[in-house]
Image (cartoon, helix red, strand yellow):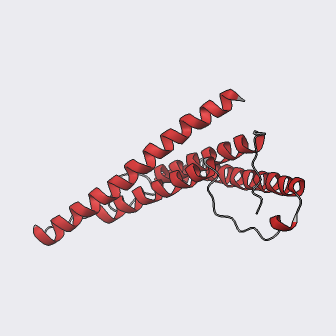
Amino acid sequence: MWLLNSIDRILRTAELVLAILAMLGVVSILTAQVFFRYVLQNPIFFAEEVALILLIIATFAGLSLLVSEERLIGIDLVGPRLSVAGRRRLVKGLQILVAATSGCLAVFAVGYISTPWVWFERFATVPLPRASLYTIVAIELCFATFHQIVIVLSDDQEVVTE
């Protein structure tokens, strides 16, 4: 289990760096766009698309990071009415459900980017295939699934008692 936790920590650090760099890139490109558009009267024609790509990367890296830190939003309607053991079973069941759902999404995403025709579609202003962005999304979904599986396999589970 220590190996899984070590890999989980490494992925978490990499995703944090990726999310921070992507958001810094969004701020930088949009700040440059404002300067070029209004001061120099010569807008950067690819700025909006690059900002959108970076925002999508930051979103999926952040989502996977939130999964790894168990900081996703939850509404607890049933938990307070259960015993501690019941709450533990409910939490474990929901963790397994999230792992299965993210795993299915990851499998479908990998299947989609494995289709050859997907790689022919290009961004409008950036000379990259759209599948490069889809690949990053698929990788982040795989990472989120891995994080959730590590959480499911861990035994040191806290149950909130309110």
- Residue at 60% x, 32% y is 7
- The x and y percentages for residue 57 are 46, 54
- Residue at 50% x, 44% y is 15
Q: Is residue 160 left or right of residue 135?
A: right
- The x and y percentages for residue 37 are 17, 69
**Quadrant in which the N terminus appears:** top right
Q: Is residue 41 visible?
A: no
- The x and y percentages for residue 66 are 58, 53
Is 35 in front, or is 86? Answer: 86
Q: Residue furthest top?
A: 3
Residue 153, picture quadrant? top right
Q: Is residue 59 left or right of residue 54?
A: right
Is 62 in front, or is 127? Answer: 62
Whether 136 is drawn above or below 49: the answer is above
- The x and y percentages for residue 111 are 65, 50
Count every numbered label the image shows and give the total. 0
Residue 39, picture quadrant? bottom left
Is 40 in front, or is 146? Answer: 146
Q: Is residue 107 left or right of residue 9?
A: right
Residue 87, picture quadrant? bottom right
Q: Is residue 33 visible?
A: yes
- Residue at 34% x, 58% y is 26
Q: Is residue 84 left or right of residue 15?
A: right
Q: Residue furthest left?
A: 40
**Quadrant in which the C terminus appears:** bottom right
- Residue at 71% x, 68% y is 75
